[in-house]
């Protein structure tokens, strides 16, 4: 990510348990306790309902259940639900600093500035054997944030359903626009996808009799989420506002749904799904295929599985 700022600066606030960063009209708050970005406020509109987290699970399909994949890899469901922060590092203008929690943060004023800051969180994943991910956030004075996740593979781990980063937004999207392949696509369902720019109204969920994985978009270069509602009772405007995710070095996969993967997973019928109140945007490094040879025992073919013994990375720009 290039930093072309010459006059703009980041404003930094070193709290006891948080790090605040202001760039133009965008404010970020990182939590040393929760181990991630917990607030992204752009132009007075909040974009996060919960902290940003890694995701290792996509809802199981009939094919996954038929071949027993849901049982073989179910530790990744727990890994998606809970991680433990093991290390935090802060780098300002290329120089690592002592973690500025209390009382170390007392050395700083309320007028600290920088041209670029990176904060990285190492999260322990309680699999057997245990593994970890590092999620790093680099912000420049142009208010661009590069998000990078590195997953460390370990011998003996079962195959992954998915691997990515999850943003839960406070209200449902009015629509989203993306540049990529048309329709719903998966690693083994790409042939019908036509490259282009597409607009999808709302956050559609495929109405399967049993709720399951849906809504994936592979080989995407950009996605823009557009909302018109906030949870701020003092803000009654209905003007559209947006947040855009851009590819960094390579295209990404994403889904934009009103539910988390575990909400889809735990519902056995459509009426068991909760009210659609949020936008759940997941940006993926890897996604397991959906198969379809049959639904009673045949696994996804080898090229479309995710080997959890290998390292993987994904990075993208939030703009």
Image (tube, rainbow, N blue to C red):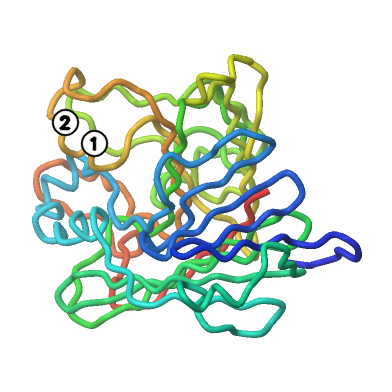
Judged left or right of residue 205, residue 21 is right
Give me the residue at 69% from left, 36% from top.
Answer: 43
Q: Residue at x 38, y 24 (%)?
A: 277
* Residue denoted by label 1: 263
Q: Secondary structure at mark 2?
A: loop
Task: Kindly identify which numbered label has been placed on residue 127.
Answer: none
Residue nearer the viewer, 293 or 152 = 152
Residue found at the very far right of the displayed protein: 6
In the image, residue 216 sits, relative to residue 122, either above or below, namely above
Residue 219 percent coordinates (x, y): 55, 51
Horizontal side of residue 121 vs 182, given as left or right = left
Residue 133: image location, x then y, percent: 37, 71
Q: Residues within 10 Å of mark 1 (few under 14, many from 20)?
A: some
Image quarter (top left, top right, bottom left or bottom right) of the N terminus: bottom right
Q: Position of residue 269 (x, y in %)?
A: 15, 23
Q: Count how many numbered circles sit on residues in the image.
A: 2
Say if 287 sits above or below 269 in the image. below
Q: Is residue 291 left or right of residue 3?
A: left
Quadrant housing residue 181: top right
- Give the quadrant of residue 161: bottom left
Q: Residue at x 33, y 51 (%)?
A: 289
State how far apart marks 1 and 2 are (Cα): 6 Å
Asked if the residues shown at circle 1 and circle 2 are in contact, with their CB atoms under 8 angstroms apart, the answer is yes
Give me the residue at 19% from left, 39% from top. 265
Q: Nearer the viewer, residue 40 or 258?
A: 40
Residue 82 versus residue 115: which sits nearer the camera? 115
Q: Helix, strand, or loop for circle 1?
A: helix
* Residue at image mark 2: 267
Q: Is residue 220 left or right of residue 103?
A: right
Neighbourhood count class around disc 2 (C-alpha, 10 Å): few under 14, some 14–19, many 20 upward: some
User: Looking at the picture, how far across and down is residue 87, in whole percent?
Assistant: 39, 77
């Amino acid at each position: 990510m290039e930093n072309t700022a010459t006059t703009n600066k980041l404003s930094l606030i070193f709290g006891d348990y948080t790090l605040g960063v202001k760039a133009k009209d965008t404010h970020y708050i990182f939590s040393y306790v929760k181990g991630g970005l917990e607030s992204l406020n752009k132009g007075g509109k909040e974009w996060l309902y919960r902290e940003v987290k890694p995701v290792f699970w996509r809802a199981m399909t009939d094919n996954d259940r038929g071949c027993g994949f849901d049982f073989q890899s179910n530790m990744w469901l727990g890994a998606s639900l809970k991680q433990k922060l093991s290390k935090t590092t802060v780098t300002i203008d290329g120089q690592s600093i002592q973690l500025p929690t209390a009382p170390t943060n007392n050395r700083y004023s309320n007028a600290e500035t920088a041209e670029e800051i990176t904060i990285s969180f190492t999260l322990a994943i309680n699999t057997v054997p245990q593994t970890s991910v590092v999620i790093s956030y680099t912000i420049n004075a142009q208010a661009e944030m590069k998000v990078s996740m590195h997953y460390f593979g370990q011998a003996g781990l079962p195959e992954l359903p998915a691997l990515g980063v999850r943003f839960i937004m406070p209200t449902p999207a009015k629509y989203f626009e993306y540049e990529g392949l048309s329709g719903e696509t998966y690693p083994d369902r790409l042939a019908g996808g036509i490259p282009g720019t597409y607009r999808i109204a709302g956050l559609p969920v495929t109405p399967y009799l049993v709720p399951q994985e849906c809504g994936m978009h592979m080989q995407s270069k950009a996605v823009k989420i557009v909302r018109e509602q906030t949870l701020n009772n003092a803000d009654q405007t209905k003007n559209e506002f947006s947040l855009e995710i851009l590819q960094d070095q390579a295209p990404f996969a994403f889904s934009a749904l009103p539910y988390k993967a575990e909400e889809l997973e735990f519902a056995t019928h459509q009426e068991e799904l909760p009210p659609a109140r949020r936008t759940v945007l997941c940006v993926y490094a890897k996604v397991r295929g959906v198969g379809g040879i049959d639904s009673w025992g045949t696994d996804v073919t080898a090229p479309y599985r995710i080997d959890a013994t290998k390292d993987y990375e994904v990075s993208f720009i939030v703009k």
